[in-house]
Amino acid sequence: MSRKKAAKAKIKKRKADIDKNIVIDDSQINLVRHQRRLKYMKTKREMKRWQIRLIRMRSLARVISFIVIIWLFFFIGHLHQWYLSKTIFDKYPNAALTIEGNEIVPTDKIISQLKNVKVDKTPIYLLNTRRLEKQIRALTPIKNVYIRRFWFPARLNIVIDEKTPLLEISPSPKVRPVAVFNEDASITTREFLPLAPKYKLYTVLTYGEYKKWTPDHLKYLIKLSEIIKQESGQDLLYLDIRNPDECYAQLSGVRLRLGQLNRSIFKRTKRIGPVIEKALSIKQEIDYIDLRWDSPDTLAIKLKETPAVEKTVNKVVTVQPKDADQ
């Protein structure tokens, strides 16, 4: 019996040792797990701290960036390159101002008008150009004005659109034109004359009454000048209407006596075409060709007086049209 008891005691002891080892292993495992959990929680807390720091740093960076952007906008917006100089119209040409398209109005006249406008301390992109345009349009030959603004650096480009001149007025063939009629019947005065050579205008000799002319009367004179030039085939140097009852047209080769300035004058001027070539072939020097005659196939020609004749002698020469020879 003692052997059996001893064997049971051993078995019981072994079981106790095994249970003890199992308890020790569980406690060790739990300790390791606890340590790992503590380490994980610590790492997680550190990550949260960094996340909070990053969020705060980002918020601070946004605020700083916003302040910097506002400051940059303020700084850039107040650079002097955004503003026109107050002396921009004092001297021309300059880098901030260009004027183009003006061929009748001198540039100094335009600058003189612009000097009447005060240059405001306003950025170029907010500048109102209407006052400048109004001042320039006050000059009679100017039809329209276009002002372009360039932002940086601030500068202006003024483009002038001038009226088309049609007819020039002079009191005598030896006197320069004193006025020019434009397409809208407005009058360009002597201060803008003479015009550039490229303008080929009809010239009318008359006195101060031209200021009372209506647009219809202006069209009447232009039409008359065009018909005379077309029918004669010569350049019309001037139309002399200083005496409305005795009008003359000076061509490059001969002078025409038109008579009274009325609507029938168009019919009389059309008679010059068929006979002018033969009239100019006459040996004697011609003073003028008289178109007042009613006969459709004859013209009166006045010859220039010679030294042997004290007074001008009127001679009527019958000139047949070209069709009459055929």
Image (cartoon, rainbow, N blue to C red):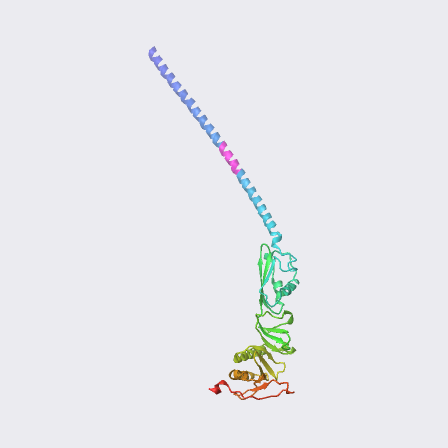
Residue 28's place in the image compared with 175, above or below, is above
The image quadrant that residue 251 belongs to is: bottom right
Residue 123 x, y percent position in the rendering: 61, 55
Residue 6 x, y percent position in the rendering: 35, 12
Residue 153 x, y percent position in the rendering: 59, 54
Q: Residue at x 48, y 30 (%)?
A: 39
Q: In the rendered image, which quarter contains the N terminus? A: top left
Residue 47 within the segment the image draws in magenta = yes
Q: Which residue is drawn at 39% across and 20% down?
A: 18
The image quadrant that residue 97 belongs to is: bottom right
Assign the magenta stretch its main secondary structure: helix
Front residue of 230/39: it is 230
Front residue of 108/130: it is 108
Residue lying at the far top of the rendered structure: 2
In the drawing, does residue 38 fall left or right of residue 10? right
Q: Residue at x 62, y 63 (%)?
A: 132
Task: Count up the numbered dots.
Answer: 0
Front residue of 36/22: it is 36
Residue 27 within the segment the image draws in magenta = no
Residue range of the region highlighted in magenta in the rendering: 42-52
